[in-house]
Image (cartoon, helix red, strand yellow):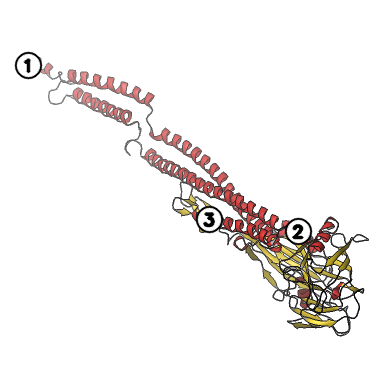
């Protein structure tokens, strides 16, 4: 190597190495002071890009976790309020069952209704005031909301909350047998308004303001076309699906309800049946009557002594060879409660209960929907003049006559009742079929099909002119319309409240499922965030063990380079000694 003055290559080399050592030492200081291996794109361009994507994901996951926790808290708030609504509905159901008992008077039921009114108001208050932040949850305004529970767009969980005001809760219902008795009848004349007088016979029947009369016989029949199992079907479509049910024209309401319930797993529609018959006892010519308060009194004369009413009753016991015989003495000043008590005494055998309605009528009810059959109705020791719906009919006989009770009882189809197919009027037994009430959590529809003709089906099975053989949608019986001030209203309230409870249970189940899902979501988000953070740390963070080792090395190199550079700068001095 030549000895030069102009160019000191050794010095230049030492300078270069010193600069590299200083640069590396500066990087060491930067990484150790920041804790980050990548402080600029120059440190690791690819690593910087990956770490930034991971940072976005981690930040999004952490926000999503908070969102999921908020959604969970909202669901828990709504579910907690619905628990209290459930408690209130359970109390209302208890009151309804209590009011349905025949031992309660009108004033007793009115007192129970007062509590129901307060409970209805409280249900509405809970629905109107339950909030999470500024969001009302139960008044129907919430609807369906999406909660962002992921780090990317549209990674959401939806929560739906329905309205839980009293007007929105209840049971979707449809009654297959109703009181519209219009249609084709065989062998009789049908007239609107006051019932006609039966001429040439000893009996008549009035049906809720529609009178029926015959000029030749007391055994006229209704619904002349009989329905068979193979000819008639009901198509029911509910939330779960559809099913076709065969309908027998001679089946009781309970039998048809059982057939519908057999398919409830396929349709989501349940059925319960009830048979109701109301009897008015009265006379226009001095016999006995039940007035609006249920007391037997006179219209044109006085009943002296005691009349004895005897009959046999069948309901759920229809398959037995003999039916219980009911015998009760009636006086002019006595109400019908003694008759109701006598019927209730054998209710375990017949499945038929009795109570005196608010209008004074004797109400017979089969809660299982069995056909109520009254046989061998006899009355002894009463006057002989009979009136039907304020019309009069002369009945020949004296006070010791034994007469068919059809001469003294006006059998009236109450709400939810109808005349059965081929039911005889007059001297033979009279069967009255009740309602089949369909209920479901959601909307459903019913379609009737018959090969025997729509009029026969509409008259005998469905008794609803608007339904005919077409489809009919269910309707909501809501909690805000509950009225347990009558026995019938109390019975109907139980079904409505059961529907409301099922409605709330369905929502609570949905909210519970969402809460469990959100718990899993939160756990998963935390796990992903942890692993993503670990991955980012491996790319971005400083390894202090490695970096401090590099720092020590670069410090030694810097010191060495500095010392060598000082010596290299002294090399040109050697040339002076040669000149000397």
Q: Which mark is residue 310?
A: none
Element on which disc 2 rests: helix
Between marks 1 and 2, how big is the CA–CA gap?
125 Å
Q: Quadrant of residue 37?
A: top left
Q: Residue at x 35, y 22 (%)?
A: 549
Give the total number of marks visible in the rendering.
3
Q: Which residue is mark 3?
A: 127
**Of 79 and 337, which appears nearest the observer?**
337
Give the left or right position of residue 341, taking residue 547 as reference.
Answer: right
Q: Nearer the viewer, mark 3 or mark 1?
A: 3
Spatial CA distance of label 3 from label 2 is 33 Å
Which residue occupies the foreground of this view, 274 or 516?
Answer: 274
Q: Position of residue 63 (x, y in %)?
A: 43, 44
Residue 124, given in percent of the width and then of the height, sits at 54, 57
> In the rendering, at what x and y percent does residue 339 appear?
82, 63
- Residue under numbered circle 2: 261
In this rendering, position of residue 209 left or right of residue 83: right
**Label 2: how many Cα within 10 Å (few below 14, some 14–19, many 20+):** some
Frontmost residue, 370 versus 294: 294
State whether residue 52 is above or below residue 473.
above
Q: Give residue 579's mark.
A: 1
Q: Secondary structure at mark 1?
A: helix
């Amino acid at each position: 190597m030549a000895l030069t003055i102009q160019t000191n290559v050794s010095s230049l080399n030492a300078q270069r190495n010193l600069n590299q050592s200083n640069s590396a030492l500066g990087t060491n200081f930067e990484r150790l002071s920041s804790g980050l291996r990548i402080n600029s794109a120059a440190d690791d361009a690819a690593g910087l890009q990956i770490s930034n994507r991971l940072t976005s994901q981690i930040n999004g996951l952490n926000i999503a976790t908070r969102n999921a926790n908020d959604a969970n808290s909202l669901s828990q708030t709504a579910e907690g309020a619905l628990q209290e609504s459930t408690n209130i509905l359970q109390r209302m159901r208890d009151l309804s069952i209590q009011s349905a008992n025949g031992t309660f008077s009108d004033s007793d039921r009115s007192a129970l209704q007062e509590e129901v009114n307060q409970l209805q108001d409280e249900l509405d208050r809970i629905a109107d005031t339950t909030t999470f932040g500024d969001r009302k949850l139960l008044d129907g305004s919430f609807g369906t909301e999406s909660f962002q529970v992921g780090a990317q767009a549209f990674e959401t969980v939806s929560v739906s909350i329905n309205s839980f005001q009293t007007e929105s809760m209840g049971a979707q219902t449809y009654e297959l047998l109703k009181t519209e008795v219009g249609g084709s009848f065989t062998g009789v004349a049908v007239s609107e308004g006051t019932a006609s007088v039966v001429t040439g016979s000893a009996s008549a029947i009035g049906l809720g303001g529609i009178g029926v009369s015959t000029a030749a016989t007391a055994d006229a029949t209704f619904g002349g076309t009989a329905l068979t199992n193979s000819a008639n079907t009901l198509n029911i479509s509910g939330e779960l699906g559809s099913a076709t049910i065969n309908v027998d024209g001679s089946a009781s309401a309970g039998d048809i309800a059982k057939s519908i319930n057999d398919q409830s797993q396929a349709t989501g529609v349940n059925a319960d049946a009830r048979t109701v018959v109301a009897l008015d006892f009265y006379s226009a010519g001095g016999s006995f009557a039940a007035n609006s308060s249920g007391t037997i009194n006179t219209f044109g004369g006085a009943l002296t002594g005691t009349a004895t009413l005897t009959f046999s009753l069948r309901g759920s016991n229809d398959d037995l060879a003999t039916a219980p015989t009911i015998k009760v003495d009636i006086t002019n000043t006595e109400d019908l409660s003694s008759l109701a008590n006598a019927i209730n005494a054998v209710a375990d055998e017949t499945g038929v209960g009795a109570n005196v309605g608010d209008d004074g009528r004797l109400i017979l009810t089969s809660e299982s929907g069995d056909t109520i059959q009254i046989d061998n109705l006899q009355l002894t020791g009463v006057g002989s003049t009979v009136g039907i719906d304020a019309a009069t009919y002369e009945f020949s006989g004296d006070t010791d006559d034994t007469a068919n009770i059809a001469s003294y009882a006006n059998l009236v189809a109450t709400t939810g009742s109808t005349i059965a197919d081929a039911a005889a009027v007059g001297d033979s037994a009279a069967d009255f079929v009740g309602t089949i009430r369909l209920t479901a959590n959601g909307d459903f529809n019913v379609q009737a099909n018959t090969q025997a003709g729509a009029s026969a089906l509409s008259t005998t099975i469905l008794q609803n002119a608007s339904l005919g053989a077409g489809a009919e949608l269910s309707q909501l019986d809501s909690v805000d319309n509950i009225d347990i001030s009558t026995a019938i209203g109390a019975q109907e309230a139980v079904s409505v409240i059961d529907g409301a409870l099922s409605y709330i249970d369905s929502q609570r189940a949905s909210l519970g499922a969402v809460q469990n899902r959100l718990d899993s979501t939160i756990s998963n988000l935390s796990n992903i965030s942890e692993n993503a953070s670990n991955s980012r740390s491996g790319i971005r963070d400083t390894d202090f063990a490695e970096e401090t080792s590099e720092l020590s090395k670069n410090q030694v190199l810097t010191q060495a380079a500095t010392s060598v550079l000082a010596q290299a700068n002294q090399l040109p001095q050697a040339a002076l000694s040669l000149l000397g």
